[in-house]
Amino acid sequence: MSNVLEIIPLGGIGEFGMNCTLLRFGDEMIVVDAGMGFPEESVYGVDICIPDFEILEQYRDEITAIVLTHGHEDHLGALPYILKKFNVPVYASRFTLGLAESKLDEHGILGDVMLHCVEPRDVVTIGSFAIEFIRASHSLIDCFSLAIKTPVGTIIHTGDYKVDETPVIGEPIDLRTLRRYGQEGVLALLSDSTNATVPGRTPSERAVIPAFEEIFAEAKGRIIVAGFASSIHRIQIVFDVAQQFNRKVCVLGRSMQKNVEIADRLGYLDIHDGMLVGINEAKHLRDDEIVFLVTGSQAEPRAALYQMATQIYKGLTIEETDTVVLSARIIPGNERAISRLIGFIYKKGANIIEEKRRLIHVSGHASQEDIRIMTEAVRPKFLVPIHGEYRMLFRHKEFVKNHMGFPEANIILIENGDVLELDGERAAVIDRREVKRTFIDDSGFEEIDYETVRERKKMANEGMITLLVTLNDQTGELEGAPQIIAQGVRGFESTNGNGSNRKTQVSSYEGSKQLVKDAQDVVMAAIAGASRQMLADFSLLKEHLRVELKRFIQKETGARPVIVPVIQKLD
Amino acid sequence: MSNVLEIIPLGGIGEFGMNCTLLRFGDEMIVVDAGMGFPEESVYGVDICIPDFEILEQYRDEITAIVLTHGHEDHLGALPYILKKFNVPVYASRFTLGLAESKLDEHGILGDVMLHCVEPRDVVTIGSFAIEFIRASHSLIDCFSLAIKTPVGTIIHTGDYKVDETPVIGEPIDLRTLRRYGQEGVLALLSDSTNATVPGRTPSERAVIPAFEEIFAEAKGRIIVAGFASSIHRIQIVFDVAQQFNRKVCVLGRSMQKNVEIADRLGYLDIHDGMLVGINEAKHLRDDEIVFLVTGSQAEPRAALYQMATQIYKGLTIEETDTVVLSARIIPGNERAISRLIGFIYKKGANIIEEKRRLIHVSGHASQEDIRIMTEAVRPKFLVPIHGEYRMLFRHKEFVKNHMGFPEANIILIENGDVLELDGERAAVIDRREVKRTFIDDSGFEEIDYETVRERKKMANEGMITLLVTLNDQTGELEGAPQIIAQGVRGFESTNGNGSNRKTQVSSYEGSKQLVKDAQDVVMAAIAGASRQMLADFSLLKEHLRVELKRFIQKETGARPVIVPVIQKLD
């Protein structure tokens, strides 16, 4: 058993989301965060992905705890999946646990897990690790940075943070405690890089209040505020400004309703009696007496805002006199969808307030000057940028090197799967594990294996042909003509799978019929020319037929569909 | 024959790209621009789309000309497709024709078309239309706005433009001629809205020169400039600054090489002898003697920059001492890919100059103050915002209404397919045609029908199952067990289509085998329970089997794959 600390990120490095980091000393391991990611493969029926927890199997008996910095999905979302495999104690803040409980309940495992609530400044000793939970400020509430004392030195993990001295809910970031650790000596700082490309300071959560007050003062009709369901500070601001302007608040969208309920129940939100109204009451109020706080800032088609903009949602639709406030950033990848949604809202004649035109959204992540404050407080020997694409990690490095004089040799850029070894003096990547990711299907519960997604990709690109050959078991002769079943293949009339009627131009239909006939001839010729060995081993015969058919189709049409040969024996 | 002008956009309204507008008076019609679009359906094997030219069939004998404002793909790219269907004369500038010829040649129709070269201030009379070609400034060269005199009044079509008084190549925008039309009276201005959300003026093409000079002065190693192949002004700047700093230029990437060749051959580029070098010569130069001008600013995987960043491209790979300049905007939708590409380049240790950090890119489109200048010059009775998503069209309207006092009733927001009728006094949308779009497959030549893309989408999302049932023609009895062939379906082991080996966990394999067995039982039960009518009409039987199998799979696994039943009769 060697006397070194290993830090192994399973996710969150070189990518946004899916944050999860292992810390291992001797035969003890803790897991910091268990986040989900949002893959680009969403067109293939997978909305989310989680870290590949298979890699943890080899450490099964070593894992002593999961520690959560905060409750955002990219830090918490994979918790049910990891707990189903490794049921170890979880440590988190009260609000984070509130979100976690709701999630574990959906997965039906809430009764079987060990959840421990910790308060700021609590120190929890788990084997060789002593973890202090330090108040961090962020767009969410009740967030932590972690000071993890290990036998080789103290590691500070910032979690997600910005330096907000005036948050709307709760206390500011606890720089004092971070500085105390800095004075005592910190071996390594694992630090949020999400906004490392942004100069200056990140504004306080309070910074949006003036713009909201202006918008509420100007609006004559209904106000619809779309934001992230997890922006609890922002939600409080909407309630506060609504009260100031004599409006009630109606919350729409499942995740927004859930988070408001949890935050209210746990006492984080300050909602005055009668301020929160249901949809039926909301409909009876005058237009200038109501605010709708809704999901859908990213133009998700099933969310409240999109539904209201394009059809009728629970009896509501966007009208000419409405003011719609998009109080959220655009998550990269959603630009086109959001622009289209804004178009729909403009078509309704409503007034839209976008982020770029007024200060109605602030980031929850540290900009460069926040990074400076954090790094100067902690004064680590080594700096390890985490949370972000490689571009942000690099810019984080560049900033502390060029603008803070941090020694370049002590800034360590790692990637998912890297094993970073620290012995108190040196830090080095000594190994790299292959870490994959696990897709979860749209239902949000079932894992989809990578191969299934790969097959969907291939079919999506060029379609699929099933080739069916029926052979007589006795004679080995072909029974009937080979069947060519095409779906989504250029040049081929598709076999209609869903009972819908479809008009087709005669010419293309005739062309397709001829193509199928020629393809059948090719397959029959291939069978006639098959070797004795192929006829004895169907896997060889299938591959032979696949290659011949593929060659023919590519030559005739240029298309390269997935081809699946099936051989059926009948007697 | 009524005495009105009809304006019918086939594309470019409510979307970026695919610009194409019909102008019709009496029984004469001209087509302004024939652009391609870049659909979000690219994962389904379609890289580009073009307007639905089917709608033109009804006007086949009326179409007298195609007029091109400039040579960008979103104005020119569909030209081969429309000419294959309607071989009418084309009018365009010399450089636009240079690009058009290259494209028509690729399609093998260059010898069969009528191309007419026009110079600025030329007036071409085509039936009832007299068209003056007016110099416009843009990121491309040799661009036109059009003044189209019709019996009901003059229409100004801006094309793409910005007000650039100091372009790098050619003369500035011809505001004088636009003002002359304004004085004579303009019925309607069809005006570019792409940048209508951007305050202020769009900088001149020259504005990037200082940043390029700084970058060249600082760079010790090789310089790699990635940009749009069509940014001819920018290309000239790279050659100029390279010469100033004693570097040669090597052009990489097919479209960049093609455009440099055309612009150089037609005399638009000013390239001094020996400045342009091939790749072999470039490799023999010292690092501080060479600039690579490359494609791939949008992180296209097959383009030069991506290849150089991730592997070896023609013997070149990005190195630590390189300076990479991303001299282009990020086209919405490409953010994630570009950010990843930047990560790859950072990993190589190279220095990256991004647009946000230095003025190395300017837009080619009119910002709000450019729009003001255009609108004040033309002084139209009606304003019709074109080119852009609905959001931009609306902001265009909002700007001229709120900041220029343009009468709201005379600002007309139209959509693709709208028939805007003008009689000289009034303007009104009197009809809406259904306009679709036509997908073109990755080869860039073949049309893909919408149904094929729709099928690919469905398969991509949940996979596909082919159900094969073989019935005895005499007895009507099932021959052998029904075959369930799954591809990309959650819970089902796939029938291996591509000969690759695949390791599978035994448990899931066993689960899949049981699922297939149960599904076969369901199908056999469904056949046993089929009505006499179904057995006589296979389309009824297929639908029956599809519904039963679908119900079973959804109940067992939650998955909803495309199910294609096939019934084969054997005797």
Image (cartoon, coloured by chain):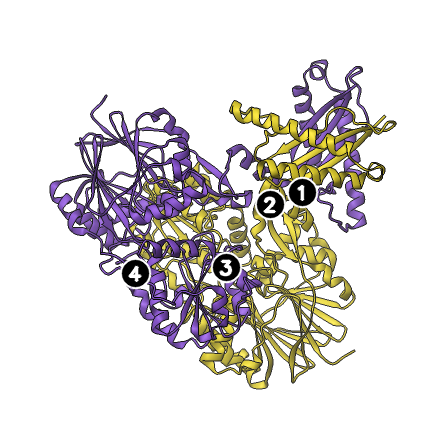
Chain colours: A yellow, B purple
Residue, disc 2: A44
Residue, disc 1: B488
Q: Nearer the viewer, mark 1 or mark 3?
A: 3
Mark yes or no: residue A70 visible: yes
Describe residue B23's horizontal placement relative to residue B492 as left or right.
Answer: left
Q: Earlier in the sequence, mark 1 or mark 3?
A: 3
Give amino acid for label 3: Ala
Residue, disc 3: B304
Residue, disc 4: B205
Task: Identify the secondary structure beneath mark 1.
Answer: loop
Of all chains, the one bearing label 4 is: B
Give amino acid for label 4: Glu
Image coordinates of residue B425 in percent, x first then y, are: 17, 32
Q: Nearer the viewer, mark 3 or mark 2?
A: 3
Depicted A490 relative to depicted A144: above or below: above
Check contact, mark 1 vs mark 2: CB within 8 A.
yes
Q: CA distance from mark 3 to mark 2?
A: 28 Å
- Give the crowd class for mark 4: few <14, some 14-19, many >=20 residues within 10 Å: many
Give amino acid for label 1: Gly
Q: Earlier in the sequence, mark 4 or mark 3?
A: 4
A291 or B559, which lies in front? B559
Image coordinates of residue A285 in percent, x first then y, are: 38, 41
